[in-house]
Image (cartoon, rainbow, N blue to C red):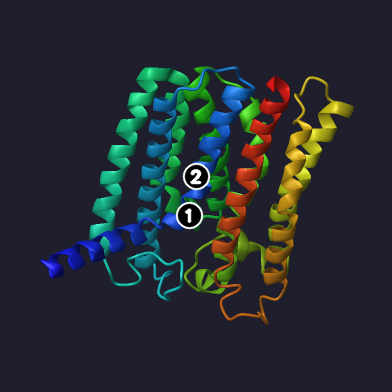
Amino acid sequence: MIETKQEQLSLLKKWLTAVRPWALPASTMPVIFGTSLAVVFGNAPFDIFRFLLALLAMIILHSAANMMSDVFDYKRGLDKMVTPVSGAIVRGWITTKEAAVGSILLFIVGSALGIVLVLLTGTILLIIGAIGVFIGVFYAALKYHALGDFAVFLNFGILGALGAWVVQTQSFSWLPVIWTVPMAMLVSAILHANNWRDAASDKERKIATIAGLLGDKASAAYYAFLIFGSVVMVIGLIIFPRLFVSQLKPMPLTFLLCILALPHVFKLWGRAVRRHKPRQPLDFVILDGATAQHNLIFGLLCTAAVWLEFLLKWG
């Protein structure tokens, strides 16, 4: 009986590792943020059932994309070295066939949940969801042709927040699209950190990524643009509409909360700068994981800013 429980625990650990749960905040935060925007600025009544369904669908579809990407990466010889954020295939815990089957099943389940939401919401969500699933299924091919950064920018940033807005309001708006750009930049930074680390091996296997095309120094500049630019973008969306474009709704001043993320930005940048002589051996190796943590912090601050504005407005 004890052995059976240990085997079950081991099986659970294998598949949890396969879906790479550390990366899930990159896709779930836009859903939470977009839902918050819909309630506070879209004046939509909060539908908790639709929210939970959208969140679950995003988690499942992201997990499916992670597993499918791992399958192609392993087969192309890209994933050979185990790191703290590696999936289950490279660790030898599951086979590529098992991962592919699991990924397909998750895509089916996630798409089914999406269809339920479409029936509850409308055709706008169908278009958003179809684009998202397409990107998820063909993500590996997009990543190999230097389109990975843009793919995650859309799927785990813009489309996630816009879809969540539509789920609650049943209508389209540019507000979640524009206001989610800073968060989407950080999602691209997560992938870029990964590709920057693997640039040499990717080049050997004729894999084109933004990091590989830019080279080491330009990749550092691009990474700085993404992590610092997310904060600058927020400040710009607070100030620019107030001074120059009255038609564009300005971000509330509560979004200045995002400045609290700057110390973490400088820590990330320090790791990037010291990539050739890191203080700790894995500092640059797990820069993608550290960037994912920062994305979570930044997303929580953005969401807190939305609800703080709600309290100040109605309190």
Identity of the residue drawn at 33% across and 25% down: 116
Which numbered circle lies on residue 216? Answer: none
Q: CA distance from mark 1 to mark 2?
A: 8 Å
Q: Nearer the viewer, residue 216 or 170?
A: 170
Q: Residues within 10 Å of mark 2 (few under 14, many from 20)?
A: many
Residue 23 shows which numbered tag?
A: 1
In the rendered image, residue 62, in percent from the top left (x then y), is placed at: 41, 46
Instruction: Give above or below for 41 relative to 10.
Output: above
- Report the side of 7 relative to 16 (left or right): left
Q: Is residue 227 visible?
A: yes
- Circle 1: is it few (<14), some (14-19), or many (20+) Cα within 10 Å? many
Q: x, y percentage for residue 11?
A: 23, 62
> Looking at the rendering, which quadrant does residue 119 occupy?
top left
Kindly tell me whether residue 184 is visible in this rendering: no
Relative to the observer, which residue lies in front, 259 or 86?
259
Q: Residue at x 67, y 43 (%)?
A: 182
Q: Seen from this angle, which residue lies furthest front?
A: 315
Question: In the picture, residue 91 is in which quadrant?
Answer: bottom left
* 230 in relation to 205, above or below: above
- Find disc 2 in the rendering and name its residue: 27
Report helix, strand or loop for mark 2.
Answer: helix
* Identity, as a three-letter code, of the amino acid under mark 2: Ser
At label 1, which amino acid type do we have? Ala
Residue 180 image position (x, y, % from top left): 63, 37
| Residue depicted at 20% across the width and 67% down the height | 6
